[in-house]
Image: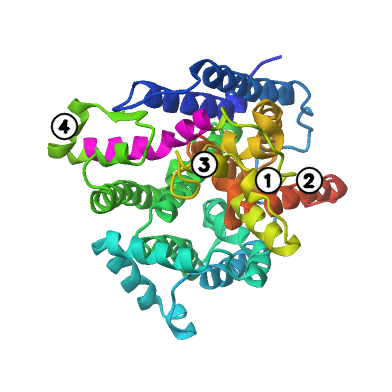
């Protein structure tokens, strides 16, 4: 049986990316002294092996492609009304999610979004401080609004891959509106002086393009780059723009690289002298050093957490969003059981990042995270096989979500930890499962497949 490398693309991406982050963590411009290096590296290796094993087993037990899986464009089996529904929900969700707005009229005014973003770009430090003041004064947020947003927030994330998949079937007006709607979270993020929305935009668009090209290569023998050339310009401008904004924002918020040492009262974090000197005259290196710190600092929090005792958080401790809302609804204390709370005096519970592994350890212990990694890789493989074989748009959207999950594994639990990501993972997974059942049910109907 011929093994096609395209089936293993997500596994290659996961393993290579995570290994590179470990190289930066261990050999980069910032030195991290680990309290228990043997335990740290043993667990990290076991997680990587679990990812590998989960993916390989999913490949072994996968269903063989059926005869009706022919050559067709992504999403051709889905009516365009699906895209319109997602677009409408994304507009509503983006408007309801915007914080610090004077009136509803501001939300409906495109110039307000642009002006707010420009102000955040020009004064990122001031915008960030204002945002943190709002967070401090409203920790729990509006629970009813959160519940409502959970049912529609997924649309903001899956709209990006949907635009890539449905692009050739959309009118010019819908294309323009759709791209602008995907920019709303970016504008919101910029207005707050934060980087999250910008990087999410780059990751979602970038990875959606990659899987679109891989699907076309797999099905038609060519990548289909010309079909989505517009997005190359978008990605080029956004990628370099995001890095420039990140470096500028950090220069105002953190300043000199030595600032990184001040966040660690244990004095286990040291910035190389050569890196400090080089960063003063080299903006690119300065941006790289700060970006590297952001991406891998969760590993250090993880190394501190493994020294603490385990108290289960009953399946909700992996998510800050779930923990806060369950505590509020049931009137119980869960936060003080988390590893993030237990190491707060050394590594800020909310001011610093904690890796994906640390968050899931709140529920399943660090040993139990091995099984979490196995299941994540197994599901990712099943979803990828579904996409690469059938062009299922929900499977494609799920792969974009998995990309965000993987990239933030060393930093935090980006997907499950917060409202938008949790909503996207839950509802898109459910829609994917239902769509598979639908395809199986009506696959005999004449004319359904091209």
Callout 2 touching callout 4 (CB < 8 Å): no
Do the numbered discs 4 and 1 sit on residues whose CB atoms are within 8 Å?
Answer: no
Q: Tell which tag, 2 or 4, sits nearer the viewer.
A: 4
Query: Quick check: can you spot residue 357?
Result: yes
Q: Residue at 63% of width from left, 71% of height from top?
A: 145
Q: Which residues are magenta?
A: 285-304
Q: Report which residue position mark 2 lands on.
A: 436
Q: Earlier in the sequence, mark 1 or mark 2?
A: 1
Residue 412's disc is 3
The structure's colour scheme is: rainbow
Camera-nearest residue between 247 and 140: 140
Q: Disc 2 on helix, strand or loop?
A: helix
Looking at the image, residue 441 sits to the left or right of residue 344; the answer is: right
How many angstroms separate mark 2 from mark 4 (CA)?
53 Å
Nearest the viewer among 5 and 315 is 315
CA–CA distance in space, label 4 to label 3: 28 Å
Q: Are marks 1 and 3 in contact (CB under 8 Å)?
A: no
**Is 289 inside the magenta-drawn segment?**
yes
Which mark is nearer the camera, 1 or 3?
3
In the rendering, at what x and y percent does residue 294 appear? 39, 40
Tell me the CA gap for discs 1 and 2: 8 Å
Q: Is residue 39 above or below residue 348?
A: above
Residue bearing mark 4: 278
Precedes in sequence: disc 2 or disc 4: 4
Question: What secondary structure is marked by label 1?
Answer: loop
In the image, residue 142 sits, relative to residue 28, either above or below, namely: below
Label 1 environment density (alpha carbons within 10 Å; few <14, some 14–19, many ≥20)? many
Sequence-earlier tag: 4 or 3: 4
Which label belongs to residue 392? 1
**Vertical order, 170 against 398 (above or below):** below
């Amino acid at each position: 049986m011929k093994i096609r490398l395209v089936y293993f693309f997500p596994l290659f991406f996961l393993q290579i990316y995570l290994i590179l982050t470990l190289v930066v963590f261990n050999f980069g411009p910032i030195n991290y002294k680990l309290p228990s290096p043997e335990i740290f590296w043993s667990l990290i290796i076991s997680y990587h092996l679990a990812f590998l094993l989960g993916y390989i087993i999913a490949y072994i037990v996968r269903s063989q492609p059926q005869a009706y899986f022919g050559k067709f464009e992504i999403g051709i089996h889905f009516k365009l009304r699906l895209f319109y529904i997602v677009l409408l929900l994304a507009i509503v969700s983006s408007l309801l999610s915007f914080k610090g707005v004077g009136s509803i009229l501001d939300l409906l005014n495109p110039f307000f979004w642009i002006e707010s973003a420009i102000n955040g770009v020009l004064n990122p430090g001031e915008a960030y401080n204002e945002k943190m003041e709002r967070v401090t004064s409203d920790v729990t947020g509006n629970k009813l609004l959160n519940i409502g947003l959970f049912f529609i927030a997924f649309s903001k994330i899956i709209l990006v891959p949907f635009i890539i998949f449905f692009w050739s079937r959309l009118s010019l007006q819908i294309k323009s509106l759709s791209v602008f709607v995907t920019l709303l979270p970016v504008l919101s993020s910029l207005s707050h002086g934060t980087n999250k929305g910008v990087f999410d935009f780059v990751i979602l668009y970038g990875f959606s393009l990659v899987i679109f090209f891989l699907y076309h290569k797999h099905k038609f023998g060519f990548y289909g780059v010309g079909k989505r050339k517009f997005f190359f310009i978008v990605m080029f401008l956004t990628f370099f723009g995001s890095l420039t904004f990140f470096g500028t924002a950090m220069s105002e918020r953190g300043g000199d690289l030595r600032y990184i040492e001040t966040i660690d009262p244990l004095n286990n974090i040291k910035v190389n002298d050569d890196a400090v000197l080089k960063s003063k005259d080299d903006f690119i290196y300065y941006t790289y050093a700060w970006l590297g710190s952001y991406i891998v600092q969760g590993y250090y929090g993880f190394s501190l957490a493994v020294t603490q005792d385990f108290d289960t958080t009953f399946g909700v401790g992996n998510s800050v969003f779930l923990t806060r809302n369950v505590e509020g609804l049931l009137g119980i204390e869960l936060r003080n059981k988390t590893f993030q709370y237990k190491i707060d005096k050394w590594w800020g519970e909310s001011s610093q990042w904690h890796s994906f592994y640390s968050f899931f350890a709140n529920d399943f212990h660090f040993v139990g995270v091995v099984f979490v990694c196995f299941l994540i890789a197994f599901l990712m493989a099943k979803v990828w096989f579904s996409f690469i074989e059938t062009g299922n748009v929900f499977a494609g959207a799920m792969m974009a979500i998995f990309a965000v999950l993987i990239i933030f594994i060393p930093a935090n639990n980006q997907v499950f930890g917060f409202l938008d990501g949790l909503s996207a993972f839950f509802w898109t997974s459910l829609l994917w499962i239902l769509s598979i059942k639908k395809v199986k049910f009506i696959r005999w109907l004449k004319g359904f497949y091209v």
